[in-house]
Image (tube, rainbow, N blue to C red):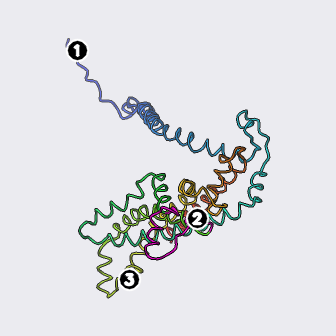
């Protein structure tokens, strides 16, 4: 008797669903990959976080702590300074040096920014023309920016020296009496401002020149076809389209100029008679320039500078958001 061979029936849809791997198994295979990617991201991010914590967050915390306590040399070492709240801020504001230092900071910052931006923009527009030695001249204009500040400041101190400076030598050659650039209360602030303008022009030139390169040339061609003069093309085309770059240039210049210390300290040390003292130099002198340092008031003045820079930064962000929304 022959036995009939039985052919297995094809699996039904229900059977296929039962044997098909569920979504959990696929998820199990993808989870290690995602976790490894997260660990790799954290590994790349860790050096930046450590750097920010060590060189920004902790110094800022220590500066705030210094400004809220009555630190002396002994308590600074032992760490047992009593908490005084905002007393150091009040002491700094009531000090006779605060008003002149604040005014000098405003004059130094505003005049520096105005001339740095104006001269830098003029040079950037000039270098947009293609002519021989254009690249070489641009490179030479970067020299003041590339030099160490101590070299630039020392050079200006020598040039403006009352007795042996080259500036007074030139004035004497044309019949003008010598000027006490660094030792006169009437001229010391303007002397350090001139030096700071010279140092800051290359930065404005580089940033504004890059912004001009991003403006499409066909816009200028259309304006020329409409009969616009060179000044009209600049005022109605270049300047409006350069506004975002100009804003960030002025903001960075403001933050940098507010904290300028080395130029003033090397050239005049804030003198004579505090005639060129700014908040930055005064903060340093309070904390480190005396035999009996005032750590608390010095830190308070430094924090005031931080607050001023932060306020202008927030104003810039708000203006940019409004322009983006418009």
Front of the two marks 1 and 3? 3
Front of the two marks 2 and 1? 2
Magenta part of the chain: 160-185
Q: Residue at x 38, y 29 (%)?
A: 19
> Residue 42: where, in percent of width, then height?
48, 37
Identity of the residue furthest to the bottom in this view = 227
Q: Secondary structure at mark 2?
A: helix
Q: Secondary structure at mark 3?
A: helix
Q: Residue at x 72, y 44 (%)?
A: 292
Q: Earlier in the sequence, mark 1 or mark 3?
A: 1
* Quadrant of the rendered image containing residue 24: top left
Q: Secondary structure at mark 1?
A: loop
- Where residue 3 is drawn, which disc sits there? 1
Q: Which residue is mark 3?
A: 231
Vertical arrangement, residue 152 with respect to residue 45, above or below = below
Vertical arrangement, residue 165 with respect to residue 150, above or below = below
Q: Which residue is mark 2?
A: 188
User: Label 2 near label 3: C-beta < 8 Å?
Assistant: no
40 lies left or right of 103:
left
* Quadrant of the rendered image containing residue 140: bottom left
> Residue 52: where, in percent of width, then height?
54, 43
Vertical arrangement, residue 19 with respect to residue 260, above or below = above
Where the N terminus falls, by quadrant? top left
* Quadrant of the rendered image containing residue 34: top left
Q: Tally the numbered discs.
A: 3
Q: Earlier in the sequence, mark 3 or mark 2?
A: 2
């Amino acid at each position: 008797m022959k036995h009939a061979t039985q052919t297995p029936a094809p699996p039904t849809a229900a059977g296929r669903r039962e044997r098909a791997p569920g979504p959990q198994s696929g998820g199990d295979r993808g989870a290690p990959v995602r976790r490894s990617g997260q660990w790799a991201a954290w590994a790349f991010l860790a050096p930046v976080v450590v750097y920010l914590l060590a060189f920004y967050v902790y110094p800022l915390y220590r500066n705030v702590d210094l400004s809220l306590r009555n630190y002396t040399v002994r308590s600074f070492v032992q760490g047992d300074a009593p908490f005084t709240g905002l007393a150091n801020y009040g002491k700094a504001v009531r000090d006779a040096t605060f008003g002149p230092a604040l005014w000098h900071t405003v004059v130094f910052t505003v005049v520096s920014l105005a001339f740095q931006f104006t001269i830098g923009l003029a040079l950037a527009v000039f270098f947009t023309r293609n002519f021989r030695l254009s690249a070489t001249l641009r490179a030479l204009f970067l020299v003041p920016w590339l030099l160490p500040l101590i070299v630039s400041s020392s050079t200006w101190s020598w040039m403006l020296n009352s007795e042996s400076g080259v500036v007074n030598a030139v004035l004497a050659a044309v019949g003008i009496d010598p000027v006490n650039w660094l030792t006169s209360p009437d001229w010391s602030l303007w002397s350090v401002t001139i030096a700071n303008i010279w140092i800051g022009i290359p930065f404005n030139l580089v940033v504004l020149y890059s912004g001009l390169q991003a403006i499409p040339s066909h816009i200028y061609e259309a304006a020329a076809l409409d009969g616009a003069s060179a000044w009209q093309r600049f005022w109605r085309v270049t300047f409006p389209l350069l506004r975002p770059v100009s804003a960030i240039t002025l903001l960075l210049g403001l933050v940098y100029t507010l904290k300028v210390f080395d130029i003033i300290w090397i050239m005049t040390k804030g003198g004579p008679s505090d005639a060129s003292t700014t908040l930055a130099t005064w903060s340093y002198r309070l904390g480190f320039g005396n035999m009996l340092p005032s750590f608390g008031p010095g830190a308070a003045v430094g924090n005031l500078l931080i607050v001023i820079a932060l306020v202008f930064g927030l104003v810039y962000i708000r203006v940019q958001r409004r322009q983006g929304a418009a």
